[in-house]
Image (cartoon, rainbow, N blue to C red):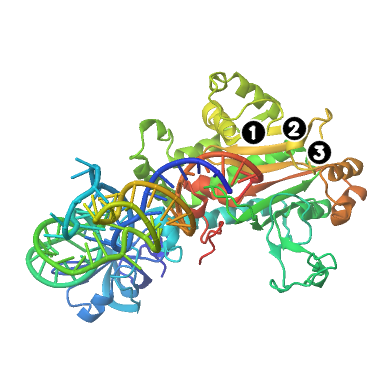
Amino acid sequence: MQIKEILQTAEIGKEITVKGWVRTKRVSSNVVFININDGSVIHNIQAVAETGIIDEETLKLVTTGSCVAITGTLIESQGQGQKVELQVKSVFVYGTADPEKYPLQPKKHSLEFLREIAHLRPRTNTFSAILRVRHSLAFAINKYFNDNGFFYLHTPIITGSDAEGAGEMFRVSTLDPIKPPLNEDGSVNYKEDFFGKETNLTVSGQLEGELGAMALSKIYTFGPTFRAENSNTTRHLAEFWMIEPEVAFFELEDNMNLAEDFTKYVINYALTNCYDDLVFLENRLKEEEKNKKKEEQSELSLIEKLRFVVDNDYVRLTYTEAIKILLNSKRHKEGKFQYPVEWGIDLQSEHERYLVEKHFKKPVILTNYPKDIKAFYMKQDEDGKTVRAMDVLFPGIGEIIGGSQREDDYEKLLQRTKEVGIHEDTIWWYLETRKYGSAPHSGFGLGFERMVLFVTGMTNIRDVIPFPRTPKSAEF
RNA sequence: UCCUUCUUAGCUCAGCUGGUUAGAGCACAUGACUGUUAAUCAUGGGGUCCUUGGUUCAAGCCCAAGAGAGGGAGCCA
């Protein structure tokens, strides 16, 4: 029986078997306490055995980290700290864990250390809580789209187009890396490769997503995404999961409404379904903040912060308005921005942070960016200067969503592809959606791990995915 | 990739101006005590001071190169 179920139903007097991993063992003269966790909930169950019930040989094997099955009767706890406990009848040890060598001790470990033992860190309270929250968020995402008439479209992981220019790509090849077949000019002959052309791991499912939306009207993708950028930050991974809805007949305004409604739904789902885990993570954060200066401590607790986002409207403003606010800010006038502010620049982290964390103090949707700093497929505004782009910025995370209304005019799109140097014959199929039955449509990409970061209150993206892939790191 | 900080026991860290046998807390082992909650108390074992090279009578400490990690920036989700 799973601990979650035991604690929920709590049928006193029932005989049950609990299978899980030992967190701590405390030995008294008359009685032994064993705390077990099976990952089904943040809470442990305490097993109590009077001396003699467990033979000494077995008891020696029950150490922190070992895996056991304990059968006994569920009784009301005689001690404080838990309502029920398990009165032990028998103990079976599945697997031992040498206490001299087992790296997880019943004490606080640094997140850096736990990253080095990613194979064992799911056994800690912090990481099991994160993984349960991560699961709930993934489930909520599928549920939201399903309940709102979207179809889950599986876009390819291996792609033959490098059209989007969303970053460096990982090559997929079965050619001999030492002696690849060559063309006459010495370049690698990819016609000999598995797919007969150069292929890479996807950096985005968007282009294929648009093809789906132009048939099924409302689709979303949710899959792994790969970027070979040499990014070493707390918010980038080489392999991450991205959600990309794409909707026919949606204009920028509809797209913003979807982004706001969707993110609020997902956060709210976590609040109602992962409350105990969030309370644990909130307390973890509070402990951490005790060591910080008062100015650096957050005004809201984790759960308050999540409720605040769910209960308040996001601020919506154009890029041009944002630039005005930045130009009028005290910080700019005092020359405290490291990077200059003027219309046409790509906003730097410090600018986004100022807007979201100092000026508005809530999620912000920025729209209508200059076309020169945005992707080729975004729909141009009438002024010819800006495009119908939107970025959703979250406090502490920065850009969590990037999206736009797509250019649906064949000629304009073709011209932009030429301007940015994309060959027509590599994305002819994408252009054809504008040739045959084109329609206005919009979509966005949400970085799943960034959402998990926000909801769990963690600060490093490597701690919200089970096995992070980053430059120079693909262990486990 | 750039800037910056760090690397000493299983973990978290201290280590003075370069000086003789490198410390603490936790963990672990043993014992005592106890319906305990990361139990408590006592005792004990435990070290490639990241690696290589250099300076020096003498290097954990100074210098150089390399490796790894953290934070910030860029790229973005």
Given the image, on which type of amino acid does mark 2 rest?
Answer: Pro
Q: First in sequence: mark 2 or mark 1? A: 1
The residue depicted at 56 percent of the width and 27 percent of the height is A337
Distance of label 3 from label 2 (alpha carbons): 11 Å
The residue depicted at 73 percent of the width and 72 percent of the height is A175
Residue hosting label 2: A370
Decide which of A450, A247 is in the foreground and name it: A450
Callout 3 environment at 10 Å: few (<14), some (14 to 19), or many (20+)? Answer: many
**Quarter of the view holding residue A39:** bottom left
Distance of label 1 from label 3 (alpha carbons): 20 Å
Horizontally, residue A380 falls left or right of residue B72, namely right
The residue depicted at 55 percent of the width and 45 percent of the height is A267
Decide which of A248, A399 is in the foreground and name it: A399
* Label 1 residue SS: loop
**Quarter of the view holding residue A47:** bottom left
Residue hosting label 1: A347
